[in-house]
Image (cartoon, rainbow, N blue to C red):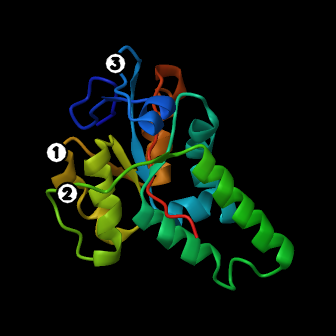
Amino acid sequence: MELSQSAPAVRAVAVTLEAAQSGRPARALAQRRLAVVDTNVWLDLFFFRDIESQSLAAALESPHWVAARCEQTDAELATVVQRPRFGSSPAEAARLIECLRNWQARTLLLPLDAQAPCRCRDPDDQKFLDLAFAAGAAVLLTKDKALLSLSREARHFGLAILTPRQFGRRFAQHGAAQGERIVQCVVPP
């Protein structure tokens, strides 16, 4: 099934970076789609620069998309990027810390104040699912098998759980041209 703005598997949520950060409602603003980006997909975007994530990277660079984050996902991401594998040289460590700061500056920090109606078998990944539902996200981007296994169940609640490759195939022709946005969860170090 190809997803479009009218597809029931994707629900639109009105939000802007300014409105979300100020706490003001986003009344007269265009409909934007939100998404949650998990830690492994973030690493694909900024560390591995994975070719299958290029559509997502382009969408995140567009003014029509925004990634949201929460303190719990920020904490996980900050911990992961400090592992020796990712900062194998001082220059690489500095580059990743700069990517993390840039990410946090251009994403929405949202409270994780709701639980998802479905449970992930990996408790460490539940925060991404909870954030997606708390934020009213249309898309959760992941390569995690435990989260992907919930795709069918989550679809009943209006959330598409996709890999970056699936995102590229489904949204490449719809993406930035239709004013979508992405949301992810992350905690500062």
Q: Residues within 10 Å of mark 2 (few under 14, many from 20)?
A: some
Q: Looking at the image, tell me whether mark 1 or mark 3 is earlier in sequence order.
A: 3
From the viewer's perspective, is residue 116 above or below residue 135? below
- Three-letter residue code for mark 1: Phe
Mark 3, residue position: 27
Tell me the kind of residue under disc 2.
Ala
| Image spot of residue 17 (x, y percent) | 50, 34
Pointer 2 or 3: first along the chain: 3
Inspect this view and state whether residue 49 appears: no
**Label 1 SS:** loop
Classify the position of the C terminus by image quarter: bottom right
Which residue type does callout 3 highlight?
Arg
Q: Going by the picture, which residue comes out furthest to the top? A: 28
Instruction: List the residue tagged with mark 2.
Output: 116
Dots 2, 1 in contact, CB < 8 A = yes
Please state which of residues 17 and 4 is positioned toward the viewer in this rendering: 17
Tell whether 65 sits left or right of 131.
right
Query: Does any portion of residue 36 appear in the rendered image?
Result: yes
Image coordinates for residue 152, horizontal then vertical, percent: 19, 53
Residue under numbered circle 1: 157
Q: Secondary structure at mark 3?
A: loop
